[in-house]
Image (cartoon, helix red, strand yellow):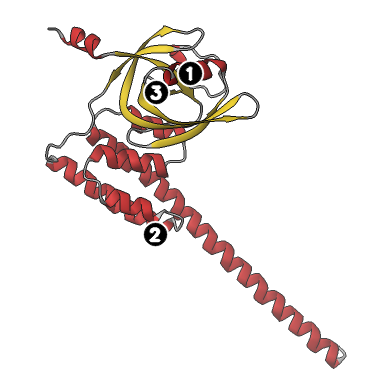
C-alpha cells in the first residue's frame, strides 16, 4: 500500500474550533472563551459525539471567517473537558490536547467547520539518541540561567519538567509556559521532529535570556540612579538646613 493511501486511511474528520492569539499543545489543558457561531456549532457537534475536536490557530487574529489559507497547517486533536455558559452567548471551554495533527483539507465550512486531519506520531519509549541527550542537556542548562533571571518562574513547572524524559514533551511544556509570543509557540508546535523542536526552543530561549539580561542591567541602573538622586537630595537638604542655621 502506498504512503498516500496509508495517510488517507489514518485521517480523521473532526469539527474545528479556531484559536486567536493562543496555542494548544498535546498533553496540556487550555481554557478559553469562544463566541463565534461556527465555533459554538462545532463544539455542540463534538459534545453530541465523542467530545473530540481539532483545535488550530489562525494566522490573522482579526479575521472573523478565515479560509484554510488563513490557518496554520498544524493543530492539536483535543478532548472537551468542561463547558461553562457565559453571558452574551459565549462559552468558557476547557480542552485537553491529545496529539499533534496536520490539517489536510476542510470538508465543510457551514454551519460549522469540519476538516480531515492526520494525527502525528507521539513521543515513544525508545532510548534517546546522543544528539537528543546533548540537546536536552543544553536546553536544561539554558533553562537554569533563565530561572535565575526570572524569579516568577513556577517551582511546580520546574518539578514537572524534571520528571520528563521525552524531548517532545519537554519542548512542548516549556514553549507553552515560557514563550510569550504565540507565533513562537506555533513555531514549536509545527515542528514534527523532537530534536529540531528542542533546537528551535534553545534559540528562542537564548533570545529570551538576552532580553532578560538587558532588562536586569536596566533595572540595576535605574535603582542606582534613584539611590544616587536620593543621596544628592539628602546632601542638598543638609546643606540648606546648615546654611539657614548659620544665616547664610
CA separation in Å, label 3 and label 2: 41 Å
Q: Secondary structure at mark 1?
A: helix
In this rendering, position of residue 221 left or right of residue 162: right
Residue 44: mark: 1
Q: Nearer the viewer, residue 135 or 67?
A: 67
Residue that badge 2 annotates:
148
Tag in front: 1 or 2: 1
Q: Secondary structure at mark 2?
A: helix
In this rendering, position of residue 193 left or right of residue 46: left
Residue 91 locus on image (x, y percent)? 55, 27
| Image quadrant occupied by the C terminus | bottom right
Residue 244 locus on image (x, y percent)? 85, 87
**Are discs 3 and 2 less than 8 Å apart at CB?**
no
Q: Residue at x 47, y 20 (%)?
A: 43
* Residue 137 in sight: yes
In this rendering, position of residue 192 left or right of residue 87: left
Q: Tell which residue pokes out farthest to the right in this image.
A: 247
Residue 56: mark: none
**Are discs 3 and 1 less than 8 Å apart at CB?**
no
Relative to residue 84, is residue 241 depicted above or below? below
Q: Nearer the viewer, residue 56 or 193?
A: 56
Q: Quarter of the image holding residue 29?
A: top left
Q: Earlier in the sequence, mark 1 or mark 2?
A: 1
Q: Residue at x 22, y 44 (%)?
A: 135
Residue that badge 3 annotates:
51
**Are discs 1 and 2 less than 8 Å apart at CB?**
no
Amino acid at each position: 500500500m502506498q504512503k498516500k493511501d496509508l495517510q488517507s486511511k489514518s485521517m480523521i474528520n473532526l469539527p474545528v474550533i479556531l484559536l486567536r492569539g493562543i496555542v494548544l499543545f498535546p498533553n496540556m489543558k487550555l481554557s478559553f472563551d469562544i463566541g463565534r457561531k461556527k465555533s459554538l456549532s462545532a463544539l455542540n457537534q463534538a459534545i453530541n459525539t465523542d467530545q473530540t475536536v481539532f483545535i488550530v490557530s489562525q494566522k490573522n487574529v482579526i479575521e472573523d471567517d478565515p479560509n484554510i489559507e488563513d490557518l496554520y497547517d498544524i493543530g492539536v486533536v483535543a478532548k472537551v473537558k468542561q463547558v461553562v455558559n457565559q453571558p452574551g452567548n459565549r462559552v468558557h471551554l476547557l480542552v485537553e490536547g491529545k496529539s499533534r495533527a496536520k490539517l489536510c483539507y476542510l470538508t465543510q465550512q457551514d454551519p460549522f467547520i469540519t476538516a480531515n486531519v492526520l494525527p502525528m506520531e507521539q513521543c515513544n519509549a525508545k532510548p534517546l539518541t546522543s544528539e537528543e541527550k546533548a540537546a536536552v542537556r543544553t536546553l536544561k542548562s539554558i533553562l537554569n540561567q533563565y530561572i535565575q533571571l526570572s524569579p516568577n518562574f513556577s517551582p511546580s513547572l520546574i518539578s514537572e519538567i524534571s520528571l520528563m524524559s521525552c524531548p517532545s514533551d519537554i519542548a512542548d511544556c516549556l514553549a507553552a509556559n515560557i514563550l510569550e509570543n504565540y507565533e513562537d509557540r506555533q513555531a514549536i508546535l509545527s515542528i514534527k521532529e523532537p530534536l529540531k523542536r528542542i533546537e528551535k526552543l534553545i534559540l528562542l530561549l537564548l533570545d529570551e535570556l538576552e532580553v532578560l539580561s538587558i532588562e536586569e542591567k536596566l533595572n540595576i541602573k535605574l535603582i542606582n540612579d534613584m539611590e544616587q538622586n536620593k543621596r544628592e537630595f539628602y546632601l542638598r537638604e543638609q546643606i540648606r538646613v546648615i546654611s539657614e542655621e548659620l544665616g547664610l
